[in-house]
Amino acid sequence: MFQLGFYSICLNGVLFMNRLLKVNYLLYIGTFLVTVLLFFCIFGPMIAPHSLTSTLETQYTNGKVLAPPMEPFETDSYPLGTDKWGYDLMSMILNGLRYTVFIAAAVTAIKMLFGTIIGLYIGTWKKTPGWMIAFENAWSYVPLFLILYFFLSPISFNSSLETSTLIGYFIIIASVISIPSIVSSVRLKTAELYQSVYIDAGRVLGAGKHRLIWKHIFPQLKESFLVMFILEIVYVIALMGQLALMNIFIGGTIMRYDPVIYLSVTKELAGLVGQARGNIYGSTHILLVPLIVLLFTTASFSLLANGLKNRFHSNYQRTPWIKTGHEPQVIPARKQYGAKGSFWTLSTPKIALGALVIAFAGAGIYVTATKDADIGVKSGSQAEYTLNLEMDANGIFSAEADIQLKNKSDEEWEELVFYFIPNVFKEGHQFESVKGTSESEINEVTLNGQKAEYTLEDDTLTIPVSKGMADRAKHKVNIKYGFTVPEKGSRFSKVSPNHYLAQWYPMAAVYQNGKWNKEPYKEGLETFHTGFSDFKISYKLPNGYSFVSTAEKDPEAEKNEGAVKAERVRDFFIAVMKDMDMYETEAEDGVKIRLFTRNNHDKDPAASLELARKALSFYQENIGGYPHNQLDIVLDEGQFMEYPGIVTINPYIGDKRFYDISIVHEIAHQYFYGVVANDPYHQAWVDEGMTEFATSMYYYAGENQPEPQAFGISRYRMEAIEEEGLGRQYSNVPLDEVKHTGFIYGQPTLEIYKMIQEKYRQKGETPKEVGMQYLSDYYQKFRYKEVDTQEFIRFTKDYFSVPTGYFNNWLDTSNKASS
Amino acid sequence: MVRAVQQIFIIFVLILLLAALPKIVSVDPMEGGLEWNFGSLHEIYGDFIMEISHGSLGSYQLGRQTRPIAEDIGDNFLTSLQIVLTGVISAVFISLLFGVFISRFRPTKIFGMMFNILAAIPDFIIIVMSMILAVKVYKVTGIRVISLRPDGGALNTWFPTMLVAIAPTLYLFKLVSVKYYQTSGEDYIKTAVAKGMGLSYINFQHVYKNIEPFIKAELVKVISLAIGNLFIIEYIMNVSGITKFVFQSHEVQPIAIGLFAMLLISLIVYVSIRLLFYLFKRGFIYE
């Protein structure tokens, strides 16, 4: 009994082993590899670690010199190495792969479609015309790549044709010239089948020609067509490779003289192999890497084709009578006639296919979702605010802030740090620009529902996180506090009867590089760095006051109680105003512009509003969409200052020109501050420089002012520096080291403009056009991201193909400056 | 006969058209489109026929000097012919041997597998890979496998010959093994087995006879494969064969002559192989 059981287990084991050996591995592996390949074709450019124009610059890090050509697997940032000029091989391959595969597939699809249809019909003719056979024979004597070579060689080198046109020509010519061979093979197969008895039977029963072809012959051939299709893809890739060896790359060849080198425009794989052909003697990897990827590509298709062929073979083949050595080992999959058609029965191949599809989709979604994640400076925290604000008739505010702080970093937080700026204007403050004083008091702080200790020093509010809570991914902070606003203050200011509430709530600092990026408050430029947050605000004001703010939709005038909200903004500014005149107009895309003013100054509100409309419309057209539905402009005594969706301008200054420029400047800030963020303490130049450049470009390109006038303000700033004898300074220094604001505003503007003047020919016709395009591309790339000097340089040097050293004149490009 | 004339005529027109393509097609720099210059076509045909009818092959540019093609083409032609002829004949021989006659033996299976793997790789990849390999071999062992100098002699031709042979071998091997497998299921094989005939005998008398027509039918394609690779190999390995006239000149005359020479090579190879088949049949197979 026992023995019998044992034997049956053994027998089962042997049968199982036999089954395993007979699995059609080729088919499964081929399917898997082709799926992987298609994935890289579709998502390759998104995964590519470097852009096609960025090069590895020779550098000396940790006692090692990194210089192109890098060997594969030497550094993490260039996994497959670089070529002689420092271009990343992996990025080129990921960008080029789709050209190779999709062009090959397109050629194959066209030629198979026409070839099979023509072949099927000609095959049913009684007699094939002699000239046709003669043509087929003659045609098959000439290697196809020669025809393509002679056609493409006059038009491919340094061609003035578009890349897509050249690809189109290749696809058309390559498919047309290979149609005859397909026609011939389909014709022969069809003719053979057409003599079968079952065709006669069909004809006798009254089947027409089309029915015979599509219902009787095509079903017999469809499987071999499928195999043929896949094999032909490989064949087209081989054709591309042959051409590449003759320096003809699909999509165009860039030929450089002195020395003569050939470069592929599309970075298509065969082209990469071709352009690296000289590397058989040294730096072989430049040639081998694309060659191996190409090999992988063709091998995947070949495996799939052979797998399919094995399956069809085993299904239809008669068993041989003699030992041939060519028997496939695959188990035939017989069609079960009359079996219940249940698609949903589970089988291993179906499960595997399902898993493959899910993996493909999942990885695709992941890649698409995270493709922008590595753009910009990382931030480890994310805040969300729910604020409640009440103001009494004496101008005393009481507020409650519910702040949700998400920890997106890998570390645990020992404390939470906030800016609490109302605290710095208390009696006895030293700020010259602030006339009055404020009172502020924090009544109660709770952290995650428990009453919490806190320390408040100047504007730094620190809430220690008790041990048990440190590992939380989300902290809830509730702060109850009250404040008054200083008379004629700086930003946070009272100009009776109006109250301007800037930085009036505890603003979460940004957690970066393992610490809270919080610097002390200083007079002058902004010292507070905040991330993008959502705000929900409820408010209550005394009668007669209007609420104008950052909110997407402000309440009607004199509505003294309500709730508003704003999404993805870096600050929430509120102007509590009384007795102001309002002017209104509309810019592009239905964006409303409102201007609030009194009539006791010499500036014309209508003209100011018109200037704002023109400037905003210009930016909307030339840079990109304005991030909000409305823009509020408040004209009153105080600072010229930008906040998301609202700006303050001082109309009581004498300099009309500066007043106008400021309006444009603050509007430009809505893009370069409001949407493209930066650390205003350590990287102040990033928004100020870009904004001043955008402002000057408005006058230069939008108003067509002569260049010296349009860039006049920056020139003036630099002259002032010279007069004061301040020498030179980099623009990317922290605020406490800045010698003159001209280095923050003027220097970047002039340097960027100089660069555009020098380099615009690479990108377009005029400096005006290229300057605006540059701003637009910069804006689109870094929307809702944070930019620092390094990111700026990486983007710009890529954009204008300049080395890092190009910026040494005005930016500190050493690594220490950025870390 | 009519078909042969038709074929010759089509080939003639085709090759001259091909040679004239660089003259016909050009990019219009102003509009950025293609320009077809068919006007000069009849001139090109006329000139070519005139030149030939004078008994000369015309001249070509070699560096700065102009040389008559007829004087230089002999050596180049022979080099190319030798490469293709050796390559294709060995391809036919190897594929028949491994595909049919000794394919049932276990050790042969390894060859079969190797061929199958190689067949999945496009020819040009094999060519580039083997060149890298040859350089590596020289670097490591000091044995010079290839020479890229045009005057390298045998060293310059054996490697190209091998590379030219690879593609046709793989193609034919695949064809032959499929046909062999298909044939082996036929009833006449069953009969032969039933009669107690030996395997080798069946292979010769039954299988080969039935496979040969397929090989003959594909012969043109096989030769064209070899010629296609010949162009590339000669070009990248600096072999002075007929490709020199095709790729190194921009005139119609040398390109056309080069292409016709290529055609002649195909023809000679085709005839030689048919002859070999004939002799083989006469010698070994009972008709």
Image (cartoon, rainbow, N blue to C red):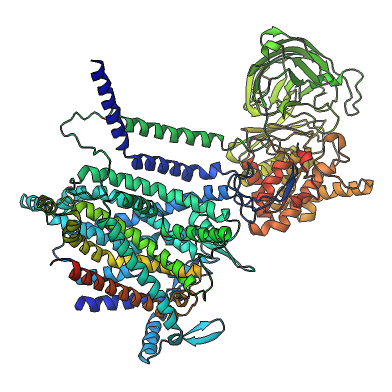
Residue A682 in the image: state x and y as whole percent.
79, 35
Tell me the residue at 25%/23% (across/down). A8
Residue A254 in the image: state x and y as whole percent.
56, 63
Position of the N terminus of chain A, as image quadrant, is top left
| Residue B266 against residue A672 in the figure, above or below | below
| Residue A314 against residue A509 in the figure, above or below | below
Q: Looking at this view, is B85 or A724 the one in front? A: B85
Residue A743 in the image: state x and y as whole percent.
83, 44
Q: Is residue B169 left or right of residue A584?
A: left
Tell me the residue at 37%/71% (across/down). B84
Q: Is residue A521 left or right of residue A377?
A: right
Residue B211 in the image: state x and y as whole percent.
21, 60
Q: Looking at this view, is A322 or A61 the one in front? A: A322
Q: Is residue A151 visible?
A: no
Position of the C terminus of chain A, as image quadrant, is top right
Image quarter of residue B263: bottom left
